[in-house]
Amino acid sequence: MALYALGDLHLSFQTNKPMDAFGKVWRHHERKIRKYVSRIVKPEDTLVLTGDHSWGRKLEECREDLAFIEALPGRKILLRGNHDMFWDAKKTDRLNEEFQGRLFFLQNNFASYQDYALVGTKGYTFEGPFWLDRQGRIMGWDEEKEQQAKKLVDRELDRLRTSFQKAEQAGYRKFIMFLHYPPTNILEKTSPFTRIAREYGVTAVVYSHCHGESRFSDSIRGSFQGAEYLLVSGDYLNFRPALVLP
């Protein structure tokens, strides 16, 4: 039994939005997903998918994408991404009722893996615009949008704390934390998300959202303040699920 993670599947079986324009790694990427997940993940394993599952804007436009995910091996746990318009955070319970026993939607709740609680939320981070000089150094940024971003960070932090608290109330003391957005932006060394990770003593922080080689180093990777930070964006991993826990 093992715990794996992979993000940003960006499926579009019903909406016909191919990802080929974003680079060669995306060509026929759904075939890679099926191939590598089937090769790596066993039926007894758990696979957390860290958001941006489907381009469909409504649930009816995502049925084939979710069926594709459901057919992959292992227990599948889904996190909200910024493109998952079909998923209203306030209606997560409805999704879990409809897909009970097939998919689990992680939002304002938690899942378990061995003696760990799997907690998570979409998260958020300020992504600019930034103003650069001729050498590419950041000289400034849109401060109004930065303030708007802080409000969204606060909302997501509240949702994440709810997830932690429910897990604690159930008796869990070991945690793996999942985000869609990276835990920090390019201006930050720490953030509210790294601080809550340290507060709860999480074993690992797993995130995605960063696409293209120029973005893979936008946030923390590796050991930081006692936790292992893992980037699991699909194109970063060439759609091979990353091992989080054996």
Image (cartoon, rainbow, N blue to C red):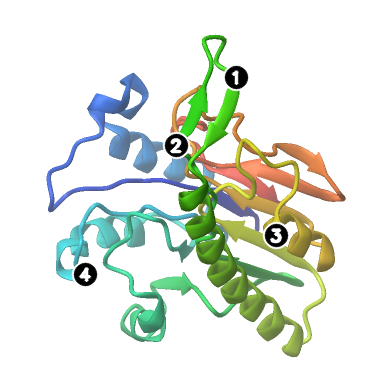
Q: Earlier in the sequence, mark 2 or mark 1?
A: 2
Secondary structure state at the residue bearing disc 2: loop
Quadrant of res 111 = bottom right
Looking at the picture, does residue 166 appear above or below residue 127? Answer: below
Q: Crowding near pointer 2: few (<14 within 10 Å), some, many (20+)? A: few
How far separated are the C-alphas under marks 1 and 4? 42 Å
**Structural distance between the alpha carbons of marks 3 and 4:** 32 Å
Tell me the residue that label 1 is attached to.
137
| Residue 38 visible in rendering | yes
- Nearer to the camera, 243 or 214: 214
Extreme residue in the top direction? 135
Separation (CA) of disc 3 from disc 2: 21 Å
Looking at the image, is mark 3 or mark 2 earlier in the sequence? Answer: 2
Disc 4 from disc 2: Cα separation? 32 Å
**How far from the left and from the top, in percent, is residue 5?**
55, 50
Give neighbour class at mark 3: few <14, some 14-19, many 20+ (Cα, 10 Å).
some
Q: Is residue 22 above or below residue 121?
A: above
Q: Amino acid at mark 1?
A: Arg
Q: Which residue is mark 3?
A: 192
Q: In the shown orientation, is residue 75 left or right of residue 203?
A: left
* Residue sitting at x 38%, y 54%: 72
**Residue type at the position of mark 4:** Leu
Asked whether the viewer can see residue 49, the reply is: no
Closer to the chain start, of discs 4 and 2, is 4
What residue is pinned by disc 4? Answer: 59
Label 3: element kind: helix
Q: Amino acid at mark 2?
A: Pro
Q: Which mark is residue 129?
A: 2
